[in-house]
Image: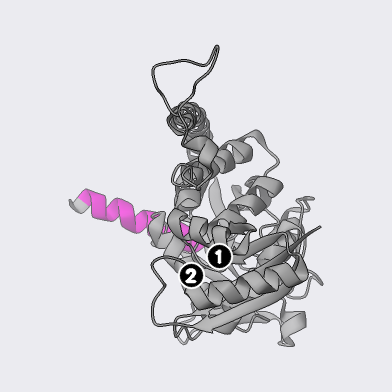
Amino acid sequence: MYSAVLVCIDFRDPSFEESVEEIKLLVKSAGASVLEVVTAKRDRPDAAMYAGKGKVQELADIVQHHCADLVIFNHAISPVQQRNVERVVKCRTLDRTSLILDIFAQRAKTHEGKVQVELAQLNHLATRLVRGWTHLERQKGGIGLRGPGETQLETDRRLLGFRVKALKTKLATIQKQRETRRKSRNRRGVIKVSLVGYTNAGKSSLFNRLTKAKAFSADQLFATLDTTTRKFAYVNQTEFVLSDTVGFVRDLPHSLIEAFKATLEETADSDYLFHVVDASSKAVEFEIDQVQAVLREIGAENVPQIMIYNKCDVADINPGIERRACGTISRVVLSALTGDGIEQFRELFPEVLLSRQERNSDKIKLENLL
């Protein structure tokens, strides 16, 4: 197992402590152990080393003392900052984005998931080919290696560009296949529901409970990467299908959102979103805001949501359905692990179907008026 020293800089962030706990979980999910957490307070990042020269020298001493394998920043740092830090600490340095991409690469199981993760990794790598390694800066030369004067770095960039183009072509094909399946479901009048939420909120456990599927679920970040769809209810001759999707996290790398666009479009095309929240989390409101931010980015902010507060057994709150004064559903409280509140939740499906039919009727009336 790799050992890592973490670097967490507090830029007067009120959720700083939660972010430190989250990066620890991310490192654990990646298969590494945390030796020590180096913290500091700053008003803004240092242009050369992000954490400042003195703090990086302190970091180098800690790395040498522990014989650490990795230094991991709980931030997105630039290629130049990464190179400068590595020169001082004499140790491989990763930022938060690289760590998340590595976890995704470990978790992806399907062909589609692997293609999406590789594309995100290559897009991230494209900005980091200049890492200070001198062999990438020398001209090719010698017997059998004389060419048009192309450096190794330029060759790497060109080959990387070819691979990115090939992966984008594959994803375009996957996207067409998804569109075909969506059109087929639309013709059959199937109601599409997607589970969304912060990573490790319990989406896969709820998915398995509702569909009797055996999707992989675990108490770790990003246990699910590959979208799974199953039929989970049948009401008034109308079929409900449920999709389990990748969890969101704070500062989710934009390259991941771009690469997973085909998968995330499934979410935007849903009739309903079941927004699963970890009721036992210390940062519930923050996690909800982060999920809503990603939904806005993928164009799913207008899809109706039902808030599901999971892990009520851990949070020690009673399961049940909470409603607003007007009678609409405010939130559902349940435990996917124990099954508490699941049957009450199932009883809502006819009500969900009715509200969907009313929305479709209103839409048709509006179109007729226009």
CB-based contact (under 8 Å), mark 2 and mark 1: yes
Question: How does the figure colour the protein chain or chains?
Answer: one colour
Q: Which amino acid does label 1 sit on?
A: Val
Residue drawn 63% across and 38% down? 114
Residue 303 visible in the current orientation: no
Q: Where is residue 213 in the image (x, y as percent from the top left)?
A: 77, 50
**Residue occupying the point 47% across, 42% down:** 123
What is the x, y in percent for residue 272?
51, 59
Q: In this view, does 110 lie above or below 346?
A: above
* Residue 316 at x, y percent in the picture: 74, 88
- In the rendered image, the quadrant that contains the N terminus is bottom right
- Residue 249 circle label: 1
Q: For mark 2, give the secondary structure.
A: helix
Sequence-earlier tag: 2 or 1: 1
How far is mark 2 from mark 1, CA to CA?
A: 7 Å
Disc tally is 2
What range of the chain is rendered magenta?
Answer: 354-368
Q: What residue type is labelled 2?
A: Gln
Horizontally, residue 335 falls left or right of residue 147, namely right
Quadrant of res 63 = bottom right
**Frontmost residue, 115 versus 244:** 115
Out of 44 and 13, give the one closest to the viewer.
44
- The part of the image, by quadrant, that contains residue 17 is bottom right
Q: Name the residue carrying label 2.
A: 290
